[in-house]
């Protein structure tokens, strides 16, 4: 068994930022356990050209809003990441019914401005990762159980690759930073002794932002829609995509992406290939023959991803919940576990900016506890 002072569970943005902050405070006695074999969590940028670290498309978050997400904006500046404004020049298309051709109309100017990162949101993950040492990061470790024996905590985890084994390994710590959605924790991690019911109810009732969604991306050599005075934005009542945007990367490939309006429960009954073919037909309907031959298409259904969504997310209405309590108010778990995932952010729950805020607050709470410990 490994011994550390503090463990971070989850290697999405909040977990990586928590690790970055611990290191900034000179705390290196930590371990980060991530279930997937790659970092990023809901941040997932797929590489289009393996020879370029710029040419990517985002399957998770795309935008941030520097005008009011100041802390995230400052971090992006500190990490020297290049940014650009979402392409929105030209008309948008509206598809109202199968009996009418799509209508081109003046697009909305996003206000405040939606901004993207060069190389995709993954650039933020990669940059944070580059500041951390390999020995602290453990990939492919699925935490199953957290035990608290008189204040000494043991985290039991399984190798995610080992689907057929019940063999677990463990790490002993004094504190745990929970950098994953509260609902995923409540659904998948066993606590001994149990957490207070009031806390687990709150965590279960906190929807995981965008967990019920699916995103489709089609990649092209050129943004041909711009030649026709179109921005690449579209709204549709016909579907399967309800909202479409230009996802082109400056100095990389051209692309369009859309959010599917087909509910998660219905998507479950259709193959990915079928859904992708419907999405491509829709792009052809909207943007013409040139849309028929993308060089790459990707569909990511987050509702079918066990490390993001639970059954409860399937039918959830799409709203940001109020941030739940980060720890137990009393009893053996008080202060021993601290929620630092985006859903715990007071200002931006569920957003990229929320992951930064919640990790900052959680690491501060941990450092305060350490200082006040006898
Ligand atoms: C399709 C989509 C579009 C979005 N668009 C935007 C946007 O444009 N702008 C914006 O601000 N936000 C957007 N978001 C939200 C944004 O992605 C999240 O706010 C942010 O990525 C959350 O980071 P996190 O680290 O808190 O959680 P996560 O990214 O969910 O990270 C949690 C990590 O914990 C790991 N984990 C889970 N279970 C276990 C376990 N048992 N053991 C160990 N590890 C475990 C997971 O694998 C994951 O890596 C979008 C999300 C999606 C899915």
Image (spheres, helix red, strand yellow):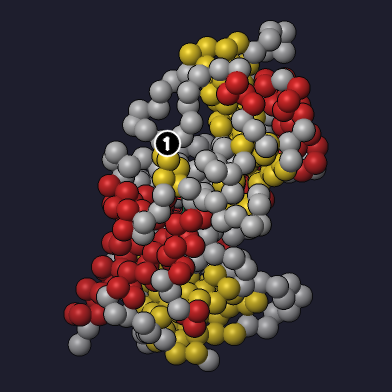
Q: Position of residue 190 (x, y in %)?
A: 53, 71
In the displayed structure, 127 sits above or below 372; it is above
- Asked if residue 339 can be seen in this view, the reply is no
Q: Position of residue 170 (x, y in %)?
A: 54, 85
Q: How many marks?
A: 1
Q: Position of residue 148 (x, y in %)?
A: 43, 81
Q: Is residue 272 left or right of residue 119?
A: right
- Residue at left 55%, top 80%? 156
- Asked if residue 159 can be seen in this view, the reply is yes
- Residue at left 55%, top 51%? 54
SS of the residue under disc 1: strand
In the displayed structure, 279 sits above or below 207; it is above
In the displayed structure, 47 sits above or below 224; it is below
- Residue at left 67%, top 37%? 221
**Looking at the image, which is closer to me, 180 or 85?**
85
In the displayed structure, 249 sits above or below 168; it is above
Q: State the quadrant of the C terminus.
A: bottom left
- Residue at left 41%, top 86%? 4
Determine whether the beta carbon of the residue marked 1 sits less than 8 angstroms from the nearest atom of ligand 1: no
Q: Is residue 154 left or right of residue 300?
A: left
Q: Where is mark 1, residue-wise?
A: 85
Q: Position of residue 358 (x, y in %)?
A: 34, 58
């Amino acid at each position: 068994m490994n011994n550390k002072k503090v463990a971070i569970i989850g290697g999405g943005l909040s977990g990586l930022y928590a690790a970055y902050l611990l290191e900034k405070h000179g705390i290196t006695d930590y371990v980060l356990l991530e279930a997937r074999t790659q970092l990023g969590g809901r941040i997932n940028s797929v590489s289009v050209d393996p020879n370029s670290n710029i040419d990517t498309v985002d399957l998770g978050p795309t935008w941030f809003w520097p005008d009011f997400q100041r802390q995230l904006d400052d971090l992006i500046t500190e990490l020297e990441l290049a940014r650009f404004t979402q392409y929105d020049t030209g008309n948008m298309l509206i598809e109202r019914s199968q009996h009418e051709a799509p209508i081109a109309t003046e697009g909305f100017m996003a206000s405040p401005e939606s901004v993207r990162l060069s190389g995709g949101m993954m650039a933020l993950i990669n940059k944070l990762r580059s500041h951390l040492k390999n020995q602290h990061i453990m990939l492919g470790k699925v935490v199953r159980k957290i035990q608290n024996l008189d204040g000494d905590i043991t985290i039991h985890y399984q190798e995610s690759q080992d689907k057929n084994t019940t063999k677990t390994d463990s790490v002993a710590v004094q504190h745990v930073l929970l950098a994953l959605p509260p609902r995923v924790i409540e659904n998948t991690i066993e606590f001994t002794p149990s957490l207070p019911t009031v806390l687990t109810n709150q965590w279960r009732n906190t929807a995981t932002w965008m967990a019920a969604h699916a995103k489709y991306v089609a990649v092209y050599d050129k943004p041909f829609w711009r030649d026709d005075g179109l921005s690449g934005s579209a709204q549709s009542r016909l579907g399967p995509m309800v909202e479409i945007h230009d996802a082109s990367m400056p100095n990389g490939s051209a692309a369009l992406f859309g959010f599917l309006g087909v509910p998660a429960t219905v998507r479950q009954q259709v193959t990915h290939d079928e859904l992708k073919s419907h999405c491509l037909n829709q792009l052809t309907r909207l943007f013409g023959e040139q849309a028929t031959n993308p060089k790459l298409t990707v569909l990511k259904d987050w509702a079918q991803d066990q490390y993001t969504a639970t059954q409860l997310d399937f039918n959830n209405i799409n709203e940001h919940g109020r941030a739940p309590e980060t720890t137990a108010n009393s009893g053996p778990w008080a202060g021993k576990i601290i929620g630092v995932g985006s859903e715990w952010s007071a200002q931006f729950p569920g957003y990229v900016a929320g992951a930064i805020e919640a990790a900052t607050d959680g690491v501060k709470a941990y450092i305060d506890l350490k200082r006040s410990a006898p």
